[in-house]
Image (cartoon, helix red, strand yellow):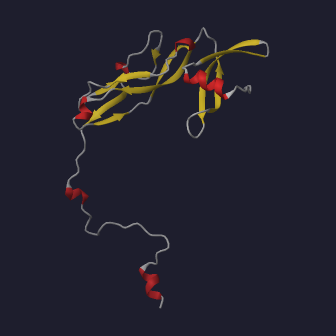
Amino acid sequence: PTTISVETKTINNLVLGGQRVFEFELDGENETTVIKEVQWDTFGINIVHFDLMRIDPNKKITVDIRVELRGNSVGVQSGGVLDQHLRTVSIECLAANIPEVIKVRINELEIGDSLHASDLEIPEGVSLLTEGTEIVVQVKEPVEVSDEELEPTEAGAAQPEVIGEKKDEEADGEG
């Protein structure tokens, strides 16, 4: 591990511009690195810390990439519930080929439909390592609860305890 310091404006511009691979000189040697982790300030505006990982630009690496849903599902518009099971997928590729995000179009998903990892459009030169049978996103039938199921039980609905409120036994003992 080596500590480096970079101006906030410089690193923000690079990361926000989609830069994932960095080459720089360290102790007289050229290093190729990839972003391993980024930590943002409270407001998500500036990077306060980042970790880089040294890599060989000619060897494939394994990384997790964010899955981004695009569009409006027909099933959701007709009352279904969208359930995104996977927010990232694992891929293997050269550092120069790492996609920023895997986009998933959900416009055609009806209630009961789902998309699996094997359905994702993976860029050329990138191999999907996530199991193809894993569900990425699905549109479920909404669960309806009847009025009877919402009624309190015979014992009555439990009430939360109010801190500082005297219980009946305490109130009876005073006086």
Residue 79 picture location, percent across and down = 23, 38
Residue at 44% over, 23% down: 130
Left or right: 65 as drawn, with respect to 95: left
Residue at 37% over, 67% down: 159
Image quadrant containing the N terminus:
top right
- The residue lying toward the viewer, choosing from 127 and 123, is 123
Residue at 60% over, 21% down: 14
Q: Compared to 92, does 169 lie above or below?
A: below
Please give the count of numbered marks on the rendered protein. 0
Residue at 50% over, 20% down: 100
Q: Compared to 144, does 71 lie above or below?
A: above
- The residue lying toward the viewer, choosing from 24 and 158, is 24
Residue 44, by quadrant, is top right
Left or right: 49 as drawn, with respect to 155: right
Residue furthest right in the image? 27
Left or right: 123 as drawn, with respect to 113: right
Residue furthest bottom in the image? 175
Residue 154 picture location, percent across and down = 25, 68
Residue 87 picture location, percent across and down = 43, 30
Left or right: 19 as drawn, with respect to 7: left
Residue 76 picture location, percent across and down = 26, 34
Residue 5, by quadrant, is top right
Q: Compared to 165, does 116 lie above or below?
A: above
